[in-house]
């Protein structure tokens, strides 16, 4: 599931390539009877309202809040996209394949590349197009989403703060201190650190990958109880959170799974994992002889080294 660095990578891509374009038309095949009456474009009635609200509107900017992509337009509404498990946005030329009834990336060749070199938009992971914004530059902003779990809705600008009021604070700003982090985590002081770090109402944007990596580097066992963790450890958690999230942002996010940037290209952070999906491997920490293990913690699989990650309980 895309976490803070991946969602920010998408937002940066939109601001770089899509900002200022006008939305001419919107298409979807997301509709599902399970969403009838819900505020989600999977309800056909809601989708027609969504389409009417944004057709002809200009994309002013994109912003990230937690794992939500917010696209501001010159209408009274903001488009909110939560990518969930497998969603990612793509920008390029597409055409409707009548026979297959699917949207196909046009041409298939990367700009400036030889005809033999396929465009990254042709990659299998980018071929599950379920939402299309037709733009005024003959290109499209498309949402590929293999498992169709993404959430897309519209929110009145004046209601946006209310909609996001339960979302925890962002961890990256310079003024977010170890004291702030400790206060947030202590809201669930009897909880296990991995689960609490991943709770979007406690802090924003951290999921399974980054919680594993942050705790590995902070030398804390993922099942440690918040209230038992020594005071000085909170500054270490914060320092490692910032370092790891910024590193991933710098290399374009994590593409171990489906995530691609808006050009359809992979990020690189999967090459820097020390714990996530490393089970069975020797711990990479200098002078540690541990082996990375995996264990179900609060319904999610945590990966860690029992040898150097201390259990506080
Ligand atoms: Zn170790």
Image (cartoon, grey):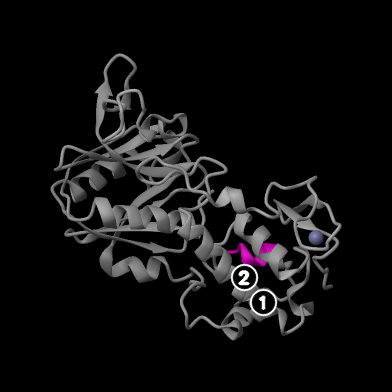
241 or 184, which is in the foreground? Answer: 241
Q: Secondary structure at mark 1?
A: helix
Residue at the extreme top? 99
- Residue tagged by mark 1? 236
Q: Residue visible at 37% across and 47% down?
A: 40
Residue 120 horizontal side relative to residue 307, left or right: left
196 magenta-colored: yes
- Which range is magenta? 194-199
Categorize mark 2 by other alpha carbons within 10 Å: few (<14), some (14-19), many (20+).
some
295 or 187, which is in the foreground? Answer: 295
Label disc, if present, on residue 14 of the rendered structure: none
Report, in whole angstroms, how far the alpha carbon at label 1 lies from the one at label 2.
Answer: 6 Å
Q: Residue visible at 24% across and 46% down?
A: 49
Taking 259 as reference, is 246 above or below it? below
Rendered location of residue 198, percent (x, y) = 61, 62
Total marks in image: 2
Rendered location of residue 150, percent (x, y) = 44, 45
288 or 222, which is in the foreground? Answer: 288
Residue 59 horizontal side relative to residue 212, left or right: left
Rendered location of residue 302, percent (x, y) = 72, 54
Q: Residue visible at 83% across and 52% down?
A: 291
Taking 225 as reference, is 301 above or below it? above
Q: Main secondary structure of the magenta part?
A: helix
The reply to whether residue 266 is visible in this rendering is yes
- Residue tagged by mark 2? 240
Q: Residue visible at 65% across and 73% down?
A: 237
Q: Secondary structure at mark 2?
A: helix
The quadrant in which the C terminus is found is: bottom right
Rendered location of residue 11, percent (x, y) = 36, 56
Residue 70 horizontal side relative to residue 305, left or right: left
């Amino acid at each position: 599931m895309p976490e803070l660095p991946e969602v920010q990578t998408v937002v940066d891509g939109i601001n770089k390539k899509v900002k200022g374009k006008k939305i001419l038309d919107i298409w979807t095949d997301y509709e599902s009877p399970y969403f009838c009456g819900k505020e989600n474009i999977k309800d056909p009635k809601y989708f027609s309202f969504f389409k009417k609200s944004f057709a002809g509107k200009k994309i002013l900017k994109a912003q990230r809040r937690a794992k939500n992509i917010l696209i501001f337009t010159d209408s009274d509404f903001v488009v909110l996209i939560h990518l969930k498990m497998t969603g990612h946005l793509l920008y390029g030329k597409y055409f409707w394949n009548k026979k297959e009834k699917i949207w196909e990336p046009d041409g298939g060749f990367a700009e400036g590349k030889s005809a033999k070199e396929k465009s990254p938009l042709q990659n299998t992971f980018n071929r599950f197009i379920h939402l299309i914004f037709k733009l005024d530059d003959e290109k499209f902003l498309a949402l590929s989403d293999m498992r169709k779990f993404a959430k897309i809705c519209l929110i009145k600008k004046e209601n946006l703060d209310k909609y996001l009021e339960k979302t925890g604070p962002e961890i990256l700003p310079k003024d977010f201190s170890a004291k702030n982090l400790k206060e947030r985590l202590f809201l669930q002081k009897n909880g296990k650190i991995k689960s609490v770090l991943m709770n979007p109402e406690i802090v924003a944007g951290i999921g399974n990958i980054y919680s594993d990596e942050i705790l590995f580097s902070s030398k804390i066992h993922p099942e440690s109880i918040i209230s038992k963790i020594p005071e000085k450890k909170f500054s270490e958690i914060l320092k490692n959170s910032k370092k790891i999230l910024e590193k991933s942002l710098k290399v374009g996010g994590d593409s171990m799974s489906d995530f691609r940037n808006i050009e359809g290209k992979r990020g690189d952070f999967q090459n820097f994992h020390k714990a996530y999906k490393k089970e069975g491997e020797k711990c990479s920490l200098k002078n540690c002889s541990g082996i990375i293990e995996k264990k179900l913690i609060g319904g999610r699989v945590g990966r860690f080294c029992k040898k150097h990650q201390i259990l506080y309980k």
